[in-house]
Amino acid sequence: MDWKSTAVISGAGILATWFFSMPPTHAPTSAVTPAARAPRRDATAAIDIEKEASRLQVRPRPEEHYSEPARNPFRFNERREPTRPTAGVAPAAPPVTIVPLPPPRPTITLDGVAADTVGGQEQRTAILHTDAGIVLAKQGDEVAGYRVTKIAADAVELTKISDGSTLNLALR
């Protein structure tokens, strides 16, 4: 579309909006309404109003006198000591000994095993995921308190340095 047709369409839209948003200039014709009749005054209505007015003049109950509230909502009360039971004293519970938990094992997973041929021999590298991040470890390296003792094609054997326990990790 070129600029001329865009201008014509935009102008027509603005003009149509302007025409339809204007209030109507002629008053709408309405049906002829009958003239309103004057309300009839009944003598009974006047008597009822006087009766209600006299009833309101009589006070059904006497006014209550102002009395000071029992508490001040803007001031704190004195702190009360809690009441202690006077019945027999319960025996004290034996002291609980808290045994410290061993530190959690580091999270180590085997992500993969890479193999390189160096001097005609295959040398494997374990790709381990630890709490510290990704670690590339060869046999004999230390990772998160463990020593890499054996790297197979799909598994790794780790020995804990502090106590000698073994951890076997396999590929998933």
Image (tube, helix red, strand yellow):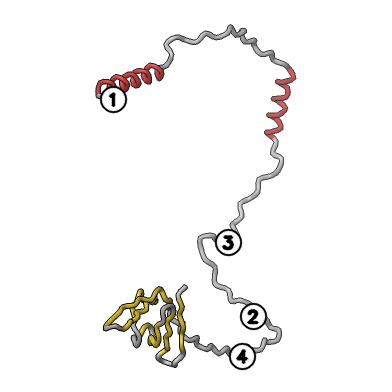
Q: Earlier in the sequence, mark 2 or mark 3?
A: 3
Q: Earlier in the sequence, mark 3 or mark 1?
A: 1
Mark 3 to mark 4 CA distance (whole Å): 45 Å
Mark 2 to mark 1 CA distance (whole Å): 91 Å
Q: Earlier in the sequence, mark 2 or mark 1?
A: 1
Amino acid tagged 3: Arg
Q: Earlier in the sequence, mark 4 or mark 2?
A: 2
Mark 3 to mark 1 CA distance (whole Å): 81 Å
Give neighbour class at mark 1: few <14, some 14-19, many 20+ (Cα, 10 Å): few
Amino acid tagged 2: Arg
Q: Earlier in the sequence, mark 3 or mark 4?
A: 3
Number of the front mark, 4 or 2: 4
Residue in the image at 71% along x and 84% along y: 87
Picture coordinates of residue 122 (x, y %)? Answer: 33, 81
Residue 49 or residue 171, whichever sits in front: 171
- Say which quadrant the N terminus sits in: top left
CB atoms at circles 1 and 4 under 8 Å apart? no
**SS class of the residue under badge 4?**
loop
Name the quadrant containing residue 134: bottom left
Residue in the image at 45% along x and 80% along y: 169
Residue wearing tag 1: 1
Picture coordinates of residue 135 (x, y %)? Answer: 34, 77
Mark 4 to mark 2 CA distance (whole Å): 22 Å
Give neighbour class at mark 4: few <14, some 14-19, many 20+ (Cα, 10 Å): few
Amino acid tagged 4: Pro
Residue in the image at 43% along x and 13% along y: 24
Residue wearing tag 4: 94
Residue 76 or residue 161, whichever sits in front: 161
Query: Which numbered dot is residue 71?
Result: 3
Query: Which numbered dot is residue 84?
Result: 2
